[in-house]
């Protein structure tokens, strides 16, 4: 699954989003691309929980590919 993440501006932002996504049950692996503003998530996590985890960190997320 791929999410478009807006609001990331630095490595700290990237790490915060990665950590938030990894904390969701069912996530196997996460790759966050700071430059292009995307997160790729492997696993069977609930999309609503992934979006909520990103938004709880102060960023916006939308589903690009599921």
Image (spheres, rainbow, N blue to C red):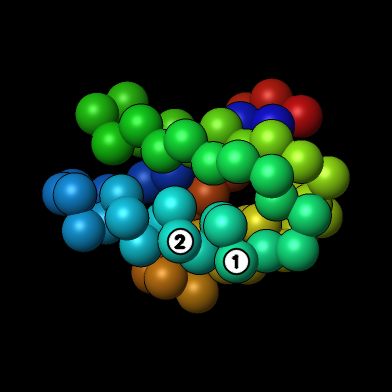
Q: Residue at x 66, y 57 (%)?
A: 50
Give yes or no for contact between labels 2 and 1 (Cβ–Cβ under 8 Å). Answer: yes
Q: Is residue 3 visible?
A: no
Residue 51 position, x and y percent, is 63, 57
Dot 1: few (<14), some (14–19), or many (≥20) neighbours within 10 Å? few
Residue 2 position, x and y percent, is 61, 31
Q: What separation in Å lies between label 2 and label 1 (alpha carbons)?
A: 6 Å
Dot 2: few (<14), some (14–19), or many (≥20) neighbours within 10 Å? some
Return the residue at label 1: 23
Quadrant that contains the N terminus: top right
* 56 left or right of 14 in image: right
The picture quadrant where one finds residue 26 is bottom right
Q: Is residue 25 visible?
A: yes
Asked whether 41 or 56 is in front, the reply is 41
Asked whether 64 or 10 is in front, the reply is 10
Return the residue at label 2: 19
Q: Residue at x 21, y 58 (%)?
A: 12
* 63 left or right of 25 in image: left
Q: Secondary structure at mark 1?
A: loop
| Residue at the limit of the structure toward the front, as seen here | 28
Asked whether 52 or 31 is in front, the reply is 31
Residue 43 position, x and y percent, is 76, 41
Residue 31 position, x and y percent, is 47, 35
Quadrant that contains the C terminus: top right
């Amino acid at each position: 699954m791929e999410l478009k993440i807006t609001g990331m501006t630095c490595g700290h932002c990237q790490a915060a989003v990665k950590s938030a996504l990894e904390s969701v049950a069912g996530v196997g692996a996460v790759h966050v691309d700071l430059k292009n503003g995307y997160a790729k998530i492997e696993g069977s996590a609930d999309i609503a929980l992934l979006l909520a985890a990103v938004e709880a960190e102060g960023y916006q997320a939308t589903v690009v590919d599921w």
